[in-house]
Image (spheres, rainbow, N blue to C red):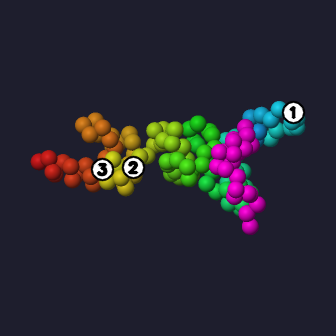
Amino acid sequence: MKLYDENIESKVWEEKLNEFLEYIVKGSFPVGIECSSPKVSYKMAQSIIWFLQEVTGIIPCEYELCAECKMIYDSGDMYYYEKNGSHYCSHCIDYAPIALCGVCGYEEVYKRRSYSNKHEMYICKECNKKMRAKNK
């Protein structure tokens, strides 16, 4: 059973979820509203939002909290990266510790170990081996 209205546009959901996030993390209220704030960490806020998505169905599942900019984004509207519970929106994708291989586009590679200055991209071990063999 889903309690949210599927006709509400994505940007409206993003705005409302970011407003909710500001409330539970920073205690920021919309103008004219006064009450006490829980002031939780971003990690706890992410858990609360996940619960409201996955367990209750109140919030659509496609909204994620970016690990870098701490903003809610619609993962269906833009390119994003997720690994081990850390999500990065398309604006912060460069901060993710892992990237896809620039040759095959499939293998995940750790950025700090796989950047090729010569090719100006991240390359997985398998593609790197193939490229070296080809150039011999």
Query: Going 69% across and 48% down the picture, which residue do you hit?
Result: 13
Q: Which secondary structure lies at badge 2?
A: strand
Q: Which residue has dot 1 on it?
A: 32
**Label annotation for residue 103:** 3
Residue 57 visible to an observer of this rendering = yes
Residue type, label 1: Gly
Query: Going 74% across and 35% down the picture, which residue do you hit?
Result: 26
Residue found farthest to the bottom: 1
- Residue range highlighted in magenta: 1-22
Check residue 81 for magenta coloring. Answer: no
Q: Are marks 2 and 1 in contact (CB under 8 Å)?
A: no
Percent of width and height locating residue 121: 32, 41
Q: Residues within 10 Å of mark 1 (few under 14, many from 20)?
A: few
Residue type, label 2: Leu
Query: Going 82% across and 38% down the picture, which residue do you hit?
Result: 37
Residue found farthest to the left: 136
Residue type, label 3: Val
Q: Which residue has dot 2 on it?
A: 100
Percent of width and height locating residue 135: 14, 47
Check residue 9 for magenta coloring. Answer: yes
Please state which of residues 32 and 23 is positioned toward the viewer in this rendering: 32
